[in-house]
Image (cartoon, helix red, strand yellow):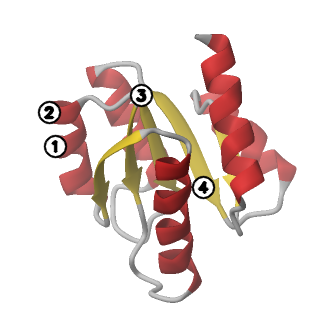
Amino acid sequence: MTAFIIKDDAFQTILFDQAMLLEMIIYQLDLDLVGVEPCGKEAILKIAQLRPDIIWIDTPLSDSPDGVSIARNIRKIYQPIIIGLTGDQDPKSRSQAKSIGFHDCLVKPLSVSKVKSSVQSIRAAM
């Protein structure tokens, strides 16, 4: 399975560390990371070319379009598995992400167990 990360580089502290952690976990789970983009606009173009199986999207992104808009644009091209990454602890935000079509929405800080569980549920559904 191929993977792509759209990360928000506006905050170079914890969010940047979270993206690096996610990259390491993806490799540990034997996924092929085909791209990481800090900007949603360029990410959509690369995703259209690469068509990764799983896309992790920081929501919200400080750049425009935001993570939800990016997900909607990607869904117009093809139907990958999309997983949101949020710092919002509100369960309403997670349920909203799922209603938009996200497979999952993980609350940061990320952990190996959170990402592994999400990937295992994807593999089980295939």
* Precedes in sequence: disc 1 or disc 4: 1
Marks 2/4: CA–CA distance: 23 Å
Q: Amino acid at mark 4?
A: Leu
Q: Amino acid at mark 3?
A: Met
Q: Secondary structure at mark 1?
A: helix
Marks 2/3: CA–CA distance: 16 Å
Q: Are marks 2 and 1 in contact (CB under 8 Å)?
A: yes
* Precedes in sequence: disc 2 or disc 4: 2
Q: Badge 2: few (under 14), some or many (20 or more) residues near its Cα, within 10 Å?
A: few
Marks 3/4: CA–CA distance: 19 Å
Give the side of residue 22 with respect to residue 94, left or right. left
Q: Which residue is mark 2?
A: 49
Q: Nearer the viewer, mark 3 or mark 1?
A: 3
Q: Is residue 37 above or below residue 30?
A: below
* Precedes in sequence: disc 2 or disc 3: 3
Q: Amino acid at mark 2?
A: Gln
Residue 85's disc number:
4
Q: Which residue is mark 3?
A: 1
Q: Can you tell which quarter of the image residue 89 is in?
A: bottom right
Q: Is residue 96 visible?
A: no
Where's residue 117, x and y in %? Answer: 74, 39
Marks 1/4: CA–CA distance: 20 Å
